[in-house]
Amino acid sequence: MSSAHHAAGDPEEYAYLWDGSEPGWILFRGKIVDIPTIFNRITREILLLEDEDEWRALTEVMRSHDVPLLDGFPAEE
């Protein structure tokens, strides 16, 4: 599993998370942080944002685009 760190920016630059151009992105609820984790089920990559407010806002945008929200870490496909 890998992770990518990103600095603050326009949420639309992350449209690949919900527009289908890069498949596999989902959200899952962890046990430690109250913000869902942004995870790609295909590449096993976690997207980490440095700014917690941006992270929270991005997950809300993803949910508004019907990105699945799971209650735990997804099993390997």
Image (cartoon, rainbow, N blue to C red):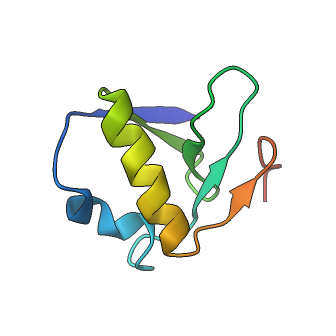
Q: Quadrant of residue 36?
A: top right
Q: Quadrant of the C terminus?
A: bottom right
Looking at this view, is 27 or 22 the one in front?
27
Q: In the depicted view, which residue is nearer to us: 42 or 68?
A: 68
44 lies above or below 2: below
**The quarter of the displayed image where residue 35 is located:** top right
**In the image, what residue occupies the spot 64% across and 56% down?**
41
Image x and y of residue 28, in percent: 68, 47
User: Is 11 placed left or right of 42 in the picture?
Assistant: left
Return the residue nearer the eye: 14 or 42. Answer: 14
Residue drawn where x is 16% and y is 46% of the image: 9
Q: Residue at x 38, y 49 (%)?
A: 57
Q: Position of residue 69 (x, y in %)?
A: 69, 58
Q: Is residue 32 above or below residue 41?
A: above
In the visual, does 72 lie left or right of 30?
right
Q: Quadrant of residue 1?
A: top right
* Residue situated furthest left in the rendering: 9
Q: Name the residue furthest top.
A: 32
Q: Position of residue 46 (x, y in %)?
A: 51, 39
Please report the residue visible at 19 percent of the width from the left and 38 percent of the height from the top.
8
Tally the numbered discs: 0
